[in-house]
Amino acid sequence: MGKPWDASVTVLQGVGSVREKALERMGIRTLGDLLMTFPRGYCDVAGGGGLAGAQPGALTAALVRAVSSPVTLRPRPGLTLVRCDVQGDGRRAQCLWYNQPWIAQQLHAGEDYLAIGRADFQQGTLRLLSPDLEPWQGQDFPPVLPLYPLTRGLSQRIFRSLTAQALRRVVGSLPDPLPAAFRRTYGLCERNYALEHAHYPATLETCRAARERLALEEMLLYMLALGDARARRAQEGLAPALPASEGLLEALRQGLGFPLTGAQERVLGEVLSDMAGTRPMNRMVQGDVGSGKTAVALMALAVAAGNGRQGALMAPTEILAVQLYQGACQLLEPLGFRVGLLTGSMKAGEKRQARAAIAQGEWDVAVGTHALIQGDVAFHDLALVVTDEQHRFGVRQRKALSGKASAPHTLVMSATPVPRSLALVLYGDLELSVVDELPPGRKPVITKLVPPSRRAAMLDYIAREAAQGRQTYIVCPAIDPGEGPPLRSASALYRELTAGPLRDTPTALVHGRMSAAAKDEALEAFRRGEVRVLVSTTVIEVGINVPQATIMVIEDADRFGLAQLHQLRGRVGRSSLTSYCFLLCGDVGEAARERLGVLTASHDGFVVAEKDLALRGPGEFLGTRQAGALDPRLMALLQDPALLERVRAMADAVWAPELPASQRDPLLEAARKRYAALYQDVILN
Ligand code: ADP
Ligand code: MG
């Protein structure tokens, strides 16, 4: 990157120490950081994008006139509300500010403002929540107004002035990693142009092209880096051949207590055939929640141990690690294998012992959390590495565990079904196996949207079911009551329920800020059935298995992604009893209802994922956590699933033998440079 890109934001007019701190809170220190903070949305204010087109949940910009004087209310201690009625585009709306009492002094009836805030509807009234206000006296705005994510101390007007100044300094200085000929072939705009138009597009169409270009570049270089790493890996170290003996497989099948499904058999066959060879396995197992990926993983680990080598199984949370450890003990110990557990919350002495057992090869299989990839863990003879719920780990962490042996076989298991088109981009260095069948006898979870008016009846039902021994999860998006529009928080809900509707029902609370011991205690009590209702945050999302639980309640369901909701729903429906999933949502608008409707209509995680991808676009679908090494700021620009096919076609064309090396090499060079960190990991292993 050129010099201006790395210059401090303090070179800009209007950035003193206060704004420098505010920008810093957003992770912005340089002009490059600033310009990589893309608008969350755009508004064609003049072209009817204002109040008339306001969608619930969406950031909305509108030219409005205050039609009343602001009113300040104090509904309860600690909460100040400022309310003002406005009008624009022939439509009325109510502006509301939480705990910003000074707004009342800045607002005057009869004056005009540009208001930018999140829209919602409350009993049919359009509201703008804590909008950013700029007095408007007929001055010009950019034709398409960028709407930036902000933090306290920054306004849209100021942020616009900063990005405009930064662009003036930076544009023209950025090299383009995509050669001109390549851009022409694929109709991609130039990089400086793209950056400028991602902030200040002339039209919504140039905006789309600019954002696409930036996101495509990121994904293309990522795919090329993965493909390159895969090609190199094929030429290096040999993995130990780990053939499976028929006798061992037979004993494992007996031990499981159920016959494998056809899909499990097929995937197990793919895994074992990789392991029997000396080319290091690099395979991902995808499968819906409850499809039985664990059984496949445990059998693979047993086969490694059966060859006298070590296996490791890494899970993203303590809860899950403990559960997998128990499962591994149950299946493997009767066959004479030694299984151990290593997690971060263990006492120093226990950890020391665990590390010694791993180093001396006393343990055949080590189960654990991130603790397994710490520098002080050395394996005696690691031959197979399995990571469960892999979307929680970045590529680097996966590689760190593989790096504990010279060339182990690696198996990663994905918690959430990812549409194939996306999996091929994200996991381009892995072979893909899909467990596309559920064990027999599973009943679909009956899924319903529950409006606030039915909430009390639902809680009654839960209490009655609890009295009969059935168990319920209630999941909230937040731990503590937060700011702004109130979300249900787990701790507040727990107090409310145990004081009221669930007074006589044994209920417990679990969230991520509790100590591991307290969490375990609550979960264990739930597992034993002593606790009938578990109020929690999404800590229970991943992998928890309590078959007697039959009801899943999700508060503020519209706040979750579909894939996550499906994952949560997968916690119930794990026995022969009929299970229910209740999605609570208030006045959330048409788009959110349509989205949630996908869940009431389908039980297949791959179908849900495809719909989610189509509705939200790859960027939002991925969020930050699945993107791995990809820059989430660039991924957020991706809105069209069809781009995934486009980027794959581009990558294929780069690898095609007929492409002259003179055209391929600069692209590979750019890929290596951008993903240097990823590279190191891949090449070291
Ligand atoms: P996931 O794929 O979500 O990790 P699990 O491996 O946790 O699913 O399996 C979910 C449940 O299904 C477990 O209780 C497991 O014992 C059970 N199970 C797995 N495979 C089968 C099968 N073939 N037949 C019956 N039950 C199975
Ligand atoms: Mg699992």
Image: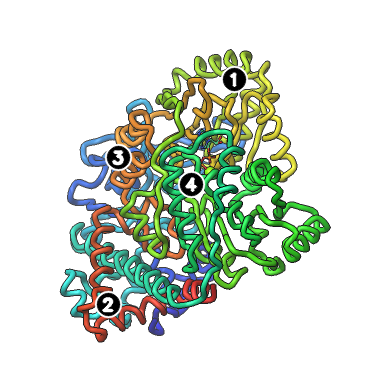
- Residue designated by label 1: 470
The residue tagged with tag 4: helix, strand or loop? loop
- Which callout, 1 or 4, points at the residue further toward the start of the chain? 4
**Camera-nearest label, 4 or 2:** 4
Near mark 4 (Cα within 10 A), the count class, few <14, some 14-19 or many ≥20, is: many
**Camera-nearest label, 1 or 2:** 1
The residue tagged with tag 3: helix, strand or loop? loop
Separation of residues labelled 2 and 3 (CA atoms)? 37 Å
Q: What amino acid is labelled 4 in the image?
A: Ala
Q: Which of the numbered marks, if any, corresponds to residue 415?
A: 4
Q: What amino acid is labelled 2 in the image?
A: Leu
The residue tagged with tag 1: helix, strand or loop? loop
Q: Are marks 3 and 4 in contact (CB under 8 Å)?
A: no
Separation of residues labelled 3 and 4 (CA atoms)? 32 Å
- Residue designated by label 3: 55
- In the foreground, 401 or 497: 401
Q: What amino acid is labelled 1 in the image?
A: Arg
Q: Is residue 442 left or right of residue 80?
A: left
Q: Note whether ligand 2 is within 8 Å of mark 4.
A: yes
Separation of residues labelled 4 and 2 (CA atoms)? 35 Å
- Which callout, 4 or 2, points at the residue further toward the start of the chain? 2
Separation of residues labelled 1 and 2 (CA atoms)? 59 Å
Q: Residue 376's spot in the image, x, y percent?
A: 72, 68
**Camera-nearest label, 2 or 3:** 2
Q: Residue 234's spot in the image, x, y percent?
A: 43, 73
Figure quadrant of the C terminus: bottom right
Corner quadrant of residue 648? bottom left
Near mark 1 (Cα within 10 A), the count class, few <14, some 14-19 or many ≥20, is: some
